[in-house]
Amino acid sequence: QVQLQESGPGLVKPSQTLSLTCAVSGGSITARFYAWSWIRQSPGRGLEWMGVITFDGSTFYSPSFKSRTSISRDTSKNQFSLQLNSVTPEDTAVYYCVRESRDSLYDLWGQGTQVTVSS
């Protein structure tokens, strides 16, 4: 049974970098043809897809986040990570790591981690 677990600081100061990691267990992040996304949810904006890293390491980003987002992976640890630069209070949200299936369905979600941007 594949499971995803987010980790990272719950509080980040404005202008700093938000860094989150998603540990995947029960399956490999290199398994063909899955992809691994970061999605966030805030009361004012709803669900926002931020970007994805595919099974072969390719990355794609939402235009809304492309200029300040980076997604990477560590295959030895079977985890992938999100970096969001120059955060503002508007980046306060629950951040989810999500698996996208071969049928382009978001079929597995982490429990989510609350990140608050505040001084």
Image: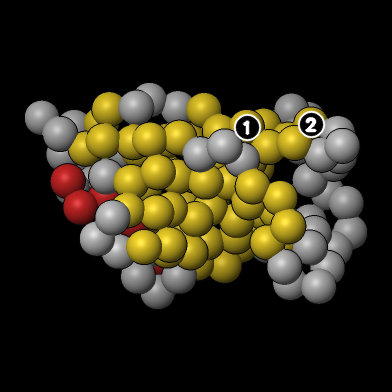
**Callout 2: helix, strand or loop?**
strand
**Callout 1: helix, strand or loop?**
strand
Relative vertical location of residue 45 with respect to residue 93 in this rendering, above or below = below
Give how far across and how far down residue 3 sits, in percent: 75, 36
Q: Specify the farthest residue to the left.
A: 119
Q: Is residue 71 left or right of residue 33?
A: left
Which quadrant does the N terminus fall into?
top right
Q: What label does residue 5 carry, if any?
A: 1
**Residue at point 71%, 50% (across, down):** 108
Kindly identify which residue carries mark 2.
25
Give how far across and how far down residue 27 sits, in percent: 86, 39
**Residue at point 61%, 40% (across, down):** 110
Cβ–Cβ under 8 Å for marks 2 and 1: yes
Classify mark 2: residues with Cα within 10 Å, few (<14), some (14-19) or many (20+): some
Relative vertical location of residue 93 with respect to residue 101 in this rendering, above or below = above
Classify mark 1: residues with Cα within 10 Å, few (<14), some (14-19) or many (20+): some
Circle 1: residue type: Gln
Give how far across and how far down residue 116 sits, in percent: 26, 35
Circle 2: residue type: Ser
Give how far across and how far down residue 41 sits, in percent: 39, 54
Q: Is residue 88 left or right of residue 58?
A: left
**Residue at point 57%, 67% (across, down):** 60
Q: Is residue 115 left or right of residue 27?
A: left
